[in-house]
Image (tube, grey):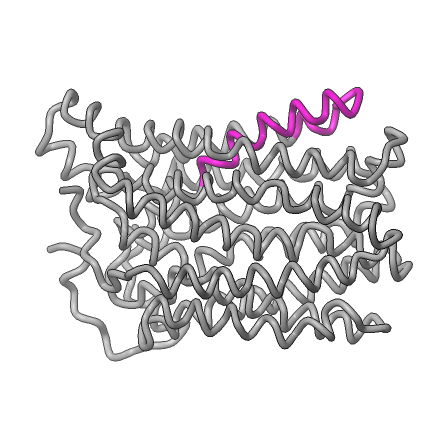
Amino acid sequence: MNASSSQPPPSSGFFGNFRRLTPAQRNTFLACLLGWSLDAFDFFILVFCVSAIASQFQVKVSAVTEAIFITLAMRPIGAFLFGFLADRFGRRRALLLNICCYSFFELASAFAPSLRGFLVIRGLFGIAMGGEWGVGAALAFETLPTEGRGFFSGLLQEGYALGYLLASFAYGIFFDFIGWRGMFVLGALPAIPVIYLILTRVKESPAWLQGRVRSTGGDREVRLVPGILTYVGSFLLLVLLMFAFNSFSHGTQDLYPTFLQKNHGFSTHTTGLIAVIYNVGALLGGIVFGSWSEKIGRRRAIVVAALLAIPAIPLWAYSDTAPMFALGGFLMQFMVQGAWGVVPAHLNELSPPAVRATFPGLAYQFGTFLASWITVMQSRLTEQRYAGNFAPVLAWTVVIVATLVAVVTASGREAKGADMSRRS
């Protein structure tokens, strides 16, 4: 029986959604969630360490934010490479290799002898990071039932916020003792239990196995490029959508800890605590709007969440005290990640089955590439035009990109409830 044909049980809500899963489905979803969380954890450690790295190498903050730019810019290569491996050799193997790769480069970052060496390593990390989302999302949604897909979409995407939350905790607790190099060592360690979980408890995608039985190896090799070119219009629209989304998230997250420290003098502990609070908001927002999208539709949920971020700007960018910044950050990330919580289900439902590990992941990461300039632009504008004051740059970023997310989303289509149990 296909996963999508099962009848929804009478239970609902958070625990009800998990009770309807088989043990194999739960293990697969957990592995994909943790893989994405670890990916984000490793990325956001850099965000908290920008000022410390700049001091270590005696450069401006904008020079270190080049590492964020390079990481984001290299992600499409990883999306194509690991997506191809997942469509050709299986989701599980590709996910396992991907996690090993980005954890290795995270560890290597701790031993960078210079800023130039650090930038090179972060570029390689970006390639590995770029593969995780598409492969993990394909494995998860091809294994999960159709019922409750919006909830699982929100929860899976907020693995990103969970990774940011863990990085916030780690920074607040450990940074003063181990420094920025120790933080990157710490970032690589959680890969060990995730790799063990995949090796011992996760099975291959049923949809991929079905496609393997029905087609020859040669057929699968030539599907990738034609599968994307056949739907080039949809692909380009998704790239534009993901450019807007990545500008939305990175434009509100990546420089916010630096803003709190540089403009308001908050300590390591206070900055980490504020980050923990706004990432709790991100987690809740993703689950709430992801689940709500089951009732009102994917596009409508995204548009509502994006536009509601704009009224949160005054608290988020122009407060004076730590509690008010925490509240503003909570509201902002509730909306930002609320919109994002719909994305995994939305993109996978719109993707051609034969290249599902490549199509949404590549669109996602090409959008990331186009948005990769945003932190460098924000930091340079702040330094050159606003005398180091991040607030107006952050505020205008939200107004522009939130509106763009809403407009592009409303211009597209959706395929809520599409059957993802097959590859053809």
Image-based side of 30 in relation to 262, left or right:
left
The reply to whether residue 173 is visible in this rendering is: no
Identity of the residue drawn at 49% across and 48% down? 243
- Residue 363: percent from left, percent from top: 39, 42
Identity of the residue drawn at 21% across and 58% down? 418
- Residue 127: percent from left, percent from top: 52, 29
Q: Quadrant of the C terminus?
A: top left
Q: Is residue 124 highlighted in magenta?
A: yes
Principal secondary structure, stretch drawn in magenta: helix
User: Of all residues shown, which one is farthest toward the front?
Assistant: 385
Q: Is residue 101 highlighted in magenta?
A: no
**Quadrant of the rendered image containing residue 398:** bottom right
The reply to whether residue 331 is visible in this rendering is: yes
The tally of labels here is: 0
Q: Quadrant of the N terminus?
A: bottom left
- Residue 172: percent from left, percent from top: 79, 54
Front in this rendered view, residue 64 or 345: 64
Image-based side of 49 in relation to 130, left or right:
right
Identity of the residue drawn at 78% across and 62% down? 391
User: Of all residues shown, which one is farthest toward the bottom?
Assistant: 10
- Residue 180: percent from left, percent from top: 79, 37
**Quadrant of the rendered image containing residue 263:** bottom right
Would you place residue 299 above or below residue 84 in this image? below
Would you place residue 331 above or below residue 4 in this image? below
Front in this rendered view, residue 370 or 148: 370
Front in this rendered view, residue 4 or 328: 328
Q: Which residues are magenta?
A: 107-132
Front in this rendered view, residue 180 or 366: 366
Would you place residue 303 above or below residue 26 in this image? below
